[in-house]
Amino acid sequence: QIEAGHSPADALRSAGDSLPKHLQGLIEAGMASGQLGGVLEEYVDLQREQNELRRRMWFAVTYPLVLVGLVFALLIGFGLCICPQFRDIFDDFGTSLPPMTIAVFWVFDSGLWWVLAAFTASVVLFLFALLGPAPLWMRLCVYEVPIFGPFWRYGRLTSFARLMTLFVEQNTPLPDALRWTAAGLSDRHLIAGQRIQRRVVGEGGSFKVCDHELRFSYH
């Protein structure tokens, strides 16, 4: 379309959903400031850093999950194959068992399935809090999970800060910078916060007022 004589802005608008909204905003900001090449280079670096952070995060999570899976497999094998034999031996001898041994037999008998159900429910809730439309308090609980939580939280915040920096460096008006940055986020709570910030800033308010409204809205 540019070769046909259309302006770059018209060409961007005609791209529609084929080009991410925040990338369209970056290109427009880069053309307006005359630093399009530098903006695109920084954007590529940002995407590369995000991909590397995700790779490290999933690598850090995979190892503990594999260990937990192996432990549960061993427990299931013990409960189904070994524990019943010991219980039959004690029953044959009519041995009076201590409460701890009775509790162990219960866990590896009918209690085993309750444990597996609780574990499965915990995993489902964790994935829902992480990837689904969960309320903020559930997402905050995920952020407290050792290793994984800080990676996930600061990865999202880093994406927001770096993308916002790219717009501000091009002297993009703050409400527009917030709007374009929100278009590049995937965390719905950050997006909601961006909307509040954009509204308050558009009305002439400060980020201090934004912080107050964010705390009020989220609590």
Image (tube, rainbow, N blue to C red):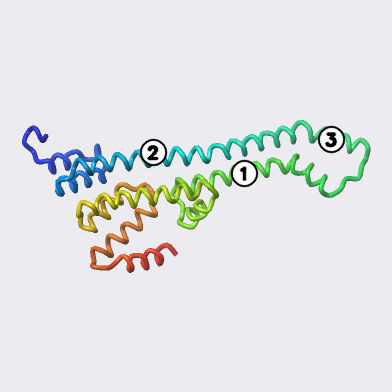
Q: Quadrant of residue 18 in the image? A: top left
Observer-side mark, 2 or 3, equals 2
101 horizontally vs 189: left or right: right
Residue at 58% across, 46% down: 122
Percent of width and height locating residue 7: 9, 41
Q: Residue at x 31, y 47 (%)?
A: 184
Q: Residue furthest right?
A: 93
How far apart marks 2 and 3 lie (CA) works out to 51 Å
- Of residue 53 and residue 181, the one placed in the foreground of this image is 53
Q: Residues within 10 Å of mark 1 (few under 14, many from 20)?
A: few
Q: Amino acid at mark 3?
A: Phe
Residue at label 3? Answer: 86
Q: Position of residue 67 (x, y in %)?
A: 61, 37
Instruction: Name the residue carrying label 1.
Output: 119
Q: Earlier in the sequence, mark 3 or mark 1?
A: 3
Q: Residues within 10 Å of mark 3 (few under 14, many from 20)?
A: few
Residue at image location 26% in from the left, 64% down from the top:
201
Q: Residue at x 37, y 50 (%)?
A: 158
Work out how far the residue at label 1 is from the one at label 2, CA to CA, in angstroms.
30 Å
Q: Say which element carries label 3.
A: helix
* Mark 2 touches mark 3? (CB < 8 Å): no
What SS does tag 2 mark?
helix
The quarter of the rendered structure image containing the C terminus is: bottom left
